[in-house]
Image (cartoon, grey):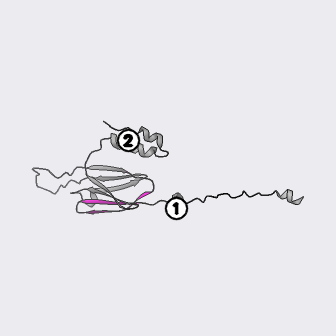
Amino acid sequence: MRTYDLTPFYRSTVGFDRLFNLLDQASSDGSPGYPPYNIERTGENAYRITVAVSGFAKDELSIVAKENTLTIKGEKVANENSKSEVLYRGIAARAFERAFQLADFVQVKDASLENGLLHVDLVREIPEAKKPRQIAINAGAKPQVIENSAAQAA
């Protein structure tokens, strides 16, 4: 059950509809907690997603970036050569799929697997045309009058 209402924000903002829709989706889907993950800011325009994938090998994981969605999947390959019987399974080795919604202009730069943690480095690269620019304000300038060339000829 949701305990907050985003309606006042819809009235006072322009162009953030997608952001509030993502918040609604995140709160309503009851996404599972496996595997656990962290999202860190590593710089002004740099981020890192760290997913705990202990027990998974590099070839059992896949990372797909499509449009504004980053999907991390893990599927354990059954070991048919093992002759041992597991009496207690405390280390989760179940398949998972975790999806992250990325903001505009966020790109995956690197991914690494070390000590059971999958690190995915992201960078937001805003194109030059989309960056803010300073607009000069003209104060008290007289408008320029462009005379008609026909009037000059007479």
Figure quadrant of residue 111: bottom left
* Depth order, front residue of 75/25: 25
Q: Is residue 22 above or below residue 118?
A: above
Q: Earlier in the sequence, mark 2 or mark 1?
A: 2
- x, y percent for residue 109: 38, 62
Q: Is residue 116 magenta?
A: yes
* Depth order, front residue of 22/57: 22
Figure quadrant of residue 80: bottom left
- x, y percent for residue 90: 14, 51
Q: Which segment did they paint magenta? A: 101-124
> What residue would you read off at disc 1?
128
> What residue would you read off at disc 2?
24
Residue for point 37% across, 42% down: 25
Q: Main secondary structure of the magenta part?
A: strand
At label 1, the amino acid type is Glu
- x, y percent for residue 147: 80, 57
Q: Is residue 106 left or right of residue 80?
A: right
Crowding at mark 2 (Cα within 10 Å: few <14, some 14-19, many 20+):
some
